[in-house]
Each structure stands twice: as C-alpha cells, then as structure tokens.
Image (cartoon, rainbow, N blue to C red):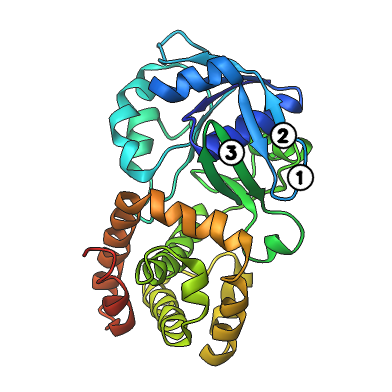
Amino acid sequence: MKILIYGAGVIGSIFAGKLASAGCEITVLARGKRFQELQEKGVILLRPGAKKREQVFVRLTDRLDPEDLYDYILVVLQRTQVNQILPFLSENRSPNIVFVVNTAAGYVPWAEAVGKDRLMLGFPSAGGVRAGGQVTYFIGKGLMRAFQTTSFAEYGGDLTPRLKTLVQIFCRAGIPAVAVRDMDSWQKTHVAVVTGIANALYRHGGDNYALSRCRQDLALMIRGIKEGLMALSRLGIRTTPPKLNFFKLPTGLLTIVFSLLMRTRLAEITMAKHTQAAKPEMQALQRELDRLIQKSGMPTPSIDELKESLFS
C-alpha cells in the first residue's frame, strides 16, 4: 500500500512510523528543519515508560506534483494550514484523499477542491510532543478508547470497501481504528469537548497539573462542555459517538473524574502540550463552534468565561 503522509508533526510522525513498520510504503511530505531531521534520523518514536526508541526511515518529499500517485493521501495538518494546500491536492490525481483535520465547519470547501468521490475524513486517537526530532506519543488503546478511537469516514457516510481497507491498515499497524457514518457530527462533538478542555488549560498557562488542583475551573470546564453539546443538540446534531453522553453525568462527579485525569502524564502529553503548541488552531476551532452556538440561539455563559483566556 502506497501512502503519502502530508504533514510531519506529531500525528503525521506517529502515522508514518507505525504504518511503515507494518509494511506500508510510506512517503512523508515535510519541509525545512523537519525534513532535515527525518532525512538524518528517520522517524523516531518513544512511548512513555519504554526503554527502547522506535526508529523508522521513510521516503521523503517536499512537494506534491500532479503526477505523484498514491493509494491514499493522509492530510495530517492543523486546521489553519489546510486551505493553502487545497490547490495542490486538487491538481493531484490520487484516488483517495483523507483529511485527518480538526474542524467543526463541515467539509464543503474540501469536497469542492478534491471532488466528493475522492474525499475521505478521519480523526486520530493519538497525541504527543515532539522535541529534538523525537516524538513521545500515546495511541488510543484499551481504556483510552472510552474517550476517543481513531475514526475514518466517507464524505457521503457510506461504509465502502476503500474505507474498510483503510481501517484494516491502521488496525494492523497497531492503531485501533473504526469506520463511522457521520463524521461531521463526530467532529462537531469533538470540538465542543476539546475547546472546553483547552480553554480551561489556558487559564492555567497550559499546566494540566495546576488545573487538576482547581475544582472551580474544572467545574467551569465541565459546564462549558455541557453548554456546547446542548447547543449542538438544538441544531439537531447528536452527541457522537454516543459514549460521550457521559458528559450528562452530574458536574460534581465529572469534576472528580477530570481532576484525576489531569494529574496524569497522558493529559500532559496529549492535552496540555498540544494546547501550548496549537493556540492559533484552538482559536480557529473556537470561532467555528461560536458560529454554531450563535445559530442555536443558546446562551453559553460558561463558554464565554472560559474562552477569555484563549483570546487574551
């Protein structure tokens, strides 16, 4: 299987290393310093607590030409980076283009750029931090999947052979994945949750351990997430996946749960470090959520208070 990973950040590096180790023919599109790091040292991954690093050398490129053909192109970029590469994706003739991008704004511009028949969607249950050319990472396995599983979908919602093949490729690579029918609701739900968490972290300078000790802000975070999900519900958008309906539990109980979660290395690497490195993306996602909230007509005082730190 010939796959292009368009983007060499944390998620792109995790995908590249794991898929290459599973036997896929991987090319990573990278530029600048990251291109040089990958050229000299390859993809270097390290699980917290593991003694041995995983090192994989992959093919590299710094451009996507129209005649470059891949079985799948995985676009693994921040929301704010996508629009500038749409012309290159539009000109390329690869049959399957998978946008693994955080958004609550829908997919019409992407469908117009690459065509509905080529467009696929995804979102990772993975995270980490990159430093010195090495990515320290987590992948959503076991109990972590109670919150999120790597998910893929067709633009039209069908469960097609190419979608099932993509899911199988990831599962074989040690990245548990599932096919979903309604990625738009899935991602809108996700944005309502992650913006609440990120904004609470920003109130503490991105320090998850400090947030874990502040029950007041944790409760504010939970109320904000509940408001976001209720606003989506008013628009007819169901909480997806349904397991995230656990946010309907009492705020006091969820505050205790997240107090424990925020004390972990998992929260530091997959939540706190990401929010510190991706504030422009979080601002873009909050604006997308704000437009949905405005459309719903629902007052959201907790969200309004939370996002003050995001835009300060």
| Mark closer to the chain start, 1 or 3 | 1
Q: Are marks 1 and 2 in contact (CB under 8 Å)?
A: yes
Q: Position of residue 131 (x, y in %)?
A: 51, 38
Residue 266: image location, x then y, percent: 62, 59
Give the quadrant of residue 307: bottom left
Give the residue number, with chain letter if any, for mark 3: 135
In space, the residues marked 1 and 2 are separated at their CA atoms by 7 Å
Q: Which mark is residue 63?
A: none
Q: Earlier in the sequence, mark 3 or mark 2?
A: 2
Residue visible at 42% across and 56% down in the picture? 275
Do the residues bearing badges 3 and 2 touch, measured as CB atoms within 8 Å?
no
Quick one: SS at disc 2? loop
| Residue 51 quadrant | top right
Circles 1 and 3: CB atoms closer than 8 Å: no
**Label 1 to label 3: alpha-carbon separation:** 13 Å
Circle 3 crowding by C-alpha within 10 Å: few under 14, some 14–19, many from 20: many
The residue carrying mark 1 is: 50
Residue type (three-letter) at the residue carrying disc 1: Ala
Residue drawn 45% across the image and 44% down it: 101
Circle 3 — which element? Answer: strand
At 33% from the left and 37% from the top, the residue drawn is 81
- Measured from the top left, where is residue 122 in percent x and y? 54, 44
Q: Give, as a three-letter code, the residue at label 3.
A: Val
Q: Is residue 291 left or right of residue 192?
A: left
SS assignment at label 1: loop
Nearer-the-camera pick, 281 or 213: 213
Say which residue label 2 marks.
53
How many C-alpha atoms fall within 10 Å of the one at disc 2: few (<14), some, or many (≥20)? some
278 vs 57: above or below: below
Is residue 40 something one can see in this rendering? Answer: yes
Label 1 packing within 10 angstroms: few (<14), some (14-19), many (20+):
few
Alpha carbon separation for disc pair 3 and 2: 10 Å
